[in-house]
Structures are given as structure tokens and as C-alpha cells.
Image (spheres, rainbow, N blue to C red):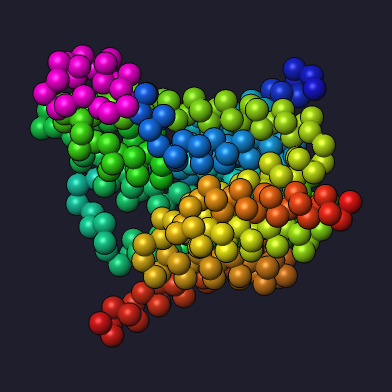
Amino acid sequence: MSFAQLIGDWHALAVLFVAGVVPNQIWRMLGLWFGGGIDEGSELLVWVRAVATAILAGVIAQIVVQPPGALASVPDALRYGAVAAGLVVFLLTRRSIFAGVVAGEVFMLAGTWWLG
Amino acid sequence: MALPPLDSPQWQSPWRAFAWGLRSITQTILTLVLFATYLGIGALAHDSHFSLLWALCSTLFVWAGPAQIILITTLGSGATVIQSAIAVTVSAIRLFPMVVSVLPLMRTPTTKRRELFFAAHLTAVTLWVECHRFLPQVPRERRIAFVNGLGFGLVSVCLTANTIGYFLAANLTQTLGAAILLLTPLSFLFSTARNSREVADVVALALGVLLYPLAAKMNSGLDILVSGLVAGTIAYGVHWWREVRA
């Protein structure tokens, strides 16, 4: 990997600023500026939080359903199985994130090994 | 490691308070979760053809794991800058109530707004959770320094994880590379599920996962937004209906 590859191009960094940095900082700075008079439990914020959660859920699904890079080499059934196995262990261990992640990873690695 | 008592001379210098904040990253399992998540983000950035500098800048300046993943996956799968910006903006709205609720914990009557700038920038779900846990044990006039130290420590851990993940994805066998990429959806699914206290959150998470494949079939380029808006609004409807009946 060359030095230039590690730096990348300025265009990509400009896109990062426009589509990544600004959209996040806007909300933080609004929070800093107008922090005083907002009710945390207001109905609008409940809806906003639900939509934000569902968008994140969609991204999680996208990575598993249309996987990038090396993850695409893993068969569909194994990827879905890994998430399902992780979820079962997560629920059985009274919501241990660590146990859920380890179980999902072990399921996928064991599956790839077993399939050869 | 326990924090010193509130009246201890340890708290007299802001730098000491910063150091205590920095050391507190060793006191939480969330540091490990963040490390795994950002290992995954580094690998995801590599496999979606972003540079290491790009990945590090996104961690430093965006500092919100979900937003970074939305950005990388949407841009990586060919969405336009505007489409990505909209998805990220919507996902980032949740930072607003977080900042609003966390800053009053550090404010004193004499605090100036600019002193809270870094604390506002560092606010994301992990810091928000940890502030509610640690700050009651920190004297109020040292809380900003403490939070800056805690945030600085967490950012450093994530930058390190990004770099390791990026090089691992470049050099590992395909199977292990896939395992690192899988860290991202798993850690986000479970940490979001863990933070879901209300029914609306659980419904939004489950429906959001289930509706995405349907929305993707429409191939509009706005799949994530469509499934997010529909699932989120249904989840809100469930919340509203329960409130009305109660």
C-alpha cells in the first residue's frame, strides 16, 4: 500500500466534510446553542429518535444483505445465521453485547470452516 | 480504579481532572465495544475503497459511529453526496437531545458557551452514557476537564482501532477480513438493542432491519431513508397508541 493510497484524494475528503462532518455538527451546535428550553420527552423527539434508530437498523441490514468487500465471500445463509445466533445469545445472556458479538463471529467462522 | 472523593485535593487542578477522565476509559466495557466497532469501521473503509486518512478524519471530525457507517456504506454503494448527506443528517438528529441533556450536567453559573464546545463535539452515545455514570462522582467545576479527558481517551482508542482494522482488512485472509467486517453490524445491532428502553425503540430497530430489504427492491437510491422513515413512523404510531390507551 503506497503513501498516496493512505492519504486518498481531496475530493473524497471534501465529500466527507459536506456529507459527514456538517450534518453531525449542525445538531451538536444547535444543542449547544438552544439547549435550554427543549423537553427531552417531547413527542417530536420520540418520533425523531424512532426514525434515527430505524435508519441505523437499515444500515445494519444493508451491510448483511448487500455486504461490502470480503464479507461478500461469505454465503448468505451464514451471514444471516451469524446475526441470528448472535441475537439468541445476546438475549439469553441478558443483553450482553460482548457475548452476542462473539457468538455471531464464532458461528460465521465455524460455518466457513465447516463448508471448507 | 475508583475516582477520588469529591473533596479530595486531587480535583484542584483541571489537568488532574483531565487525567482522571482519560484513565476512566479503562473502567468501562463500552471502550471494548467501541474498539471492536471502530476496528470494523476501519476495515469497512478499506473494503469500500476509502483512504486511511479519510477514515481517521471521519472518526476525528464526525465522531458518531452510526453516521460514519451510513456515510461509508451509502457512498460506497454509489449514492450521491446529497443522498448520503440527507441520510447522515437524519441519523445525527439524535445528537441534539443528547447534547441538550448532557451539557447541563457540566454547566456552572459562570460557564461560558465556548468552554463547552469540545464537550458538545465529543458527545455521542458512549460519552452520553458514561457522563451520566461518572459525573455525579466529579466536582461540578472540574466536570468539563474530566469529560474532555474521557472524550480524548475514547477518540484515541478509536483512531488506533481504525488504523489496525484498515491494515488488517488489507492483509488478512478473506475469511478473517469478513469476520472483522461482521463486527460492525453485530456490535451496532446489540448496542442499539441494549439502549432501547422504550417499545418505540425496539419496534423501530426490528422493523428497520426487516423493511430495508423490501425498500432496497425499489432501487430508488433512497432505500435507507424510505425504510427508516416508514419503520420509524410506525414505531412512533405504536408509542402513540399505547399512550392513548394508557
Q: Is residue B150 magenta?
A: no
Q: Is residue B113 left or right of residue A73?
A: left
Quarter of the image for residue B214 reads: bottom right
Residue at the spot 48% in from the left edge and 52% down from the top edge = A96
Q: Nearer the viewer, residue B39 or B92?
A: B39
User: Where is residue B156 shown, x and y percent of the image?
Assistant: 49, 25
Residue at the spot 68% in from the left edge and 41% down from the top edge = B180
Residue at the spot 72% in from the left edge and 70% down from the top edge = B217
Residue at the bottom extreme, as displayed: B245
Q: Is residue B19 magenta?
A: yes
Quarter of the image for residue B12 reads: top left
| Picture mark count | 0
Residue at the right extreme, as displayed: A116
Quadrant containing the N terminus of chain B is top left
Residue B27 visible in rendering: yes
Q: Nearer the viewer, residue B192 or A6?
A: B192
User: Where is residue B155 shown, x and y percent of the image?
Assistant: 47, 29
Q: Is residue B159 left or right of residue B49?
A: left
Q: Which segment did they paint magenta?
A: B1-22
Is B170 drawn above or below residue A35 in the view shown?
above
User: Where is residue B211 shown, x and y percent of the image?
Assistant: 61, 71
Quadrant containing the C terminus of chain B is bottom left
Residue at the spot 26% in from the left edge and 21% down from the top edge = B17
Q: Is residue A45 left or right of residue B228?
A: left
